[in-house]
Amino acid sequence: MLYIFDWDGTLCDSLSLITTSIRRSCEHLGLPVRSEEENRSIIGLGLKEALEHLYPEIPDNQLDKLILAYRDHYLAGDKSQPSQLYSGVQEVLDELRSQGHQLAVATGKSRRGLDRVLGELKMHHYFEHSRCADETRSKPHPLMLQEILQESGAHPRDAIMVGDTDFDLLMAKSASVQAIGVSYGAHPLDRIMQAEPHRIIDHISELLED
């Protein structure tokens, strides 16, 4: 089986860092600050798509400044207090690999951002395949999953997408891939349920249950 994981909010406890970075970037640029709920609602999209959704009224040059400010605040925040994996994640990944499953990441992060955090956590070797939002279409478009499936040689029926947002689950549905939603991430449970996942889990360890 090919297990494809979202990163932020599914494997990595980075949601607070993301929303704080958005808020500080907007304060820095004098933009109206969105609510915590609004900021969490766009997690999972590519950065440009996420900020466009939050601030559709701002011109492109202001959007570019917001993207740069976000990156600066995110890196500064991560340097002072690095994001960590959720409890049990590494053990689950170890067990899945020991059972012979392939592991992959499909994320709204940039390639540079994913490579940086995988390097910091010494986790590059866990994932045989990965796709980032800046090298393909952003979620919920299915291209990210389709490229991983093609690269891995896996059929959609032999893949599982695990994510914390409806962007993850709708992407999986469009790619004919089984979707598992996690209840502890960016999107509330009722929004997750509307995407009709095959299953909801409250802790990553439940992936190992029959």
Image (tube, rainbow, N blue to C red):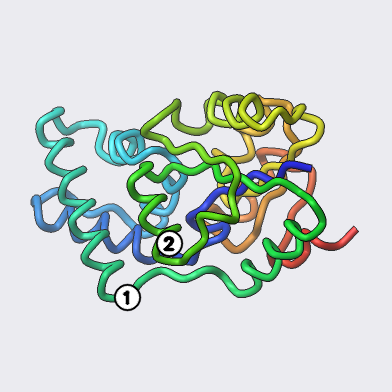
Residue highlighted by disc 1: 81
Residue 1, image x, y percentages: 79, 43
Q: Quadrant of the C terminus?
A: bottom right
Residue 51, image x, y percentages: 29, 40
Secondary structure beneath label 1: loop
Q: What residue lies at 42% left-to-right and 56% top-to-bottom?
A: 37
- In the displayed structure, does residue 152 sit left or right of residue 33? right
- In the displayed structure, does residue 117 sit left or right of residue 21? right
Q: Nearer the viewer, mark 2 or mark 1?
A: 1
Give the residue furthest to the front.
125
Mark 2: amino acid? Leu
Secondary structure beneath label 2: helix
- In the displayed structure, does residue 128 sit left or right of residue 119? right
The dot on residue 140 is none
Residue highlighted by disc 2: 15
Mark 1: amino acid? Gln
Q: What residue lies at 71% left-to-right and 46% top-to-bottom?
A: 102
Using the image as rendered, state which of residue 45 and residue 88 is in the foreground: 88
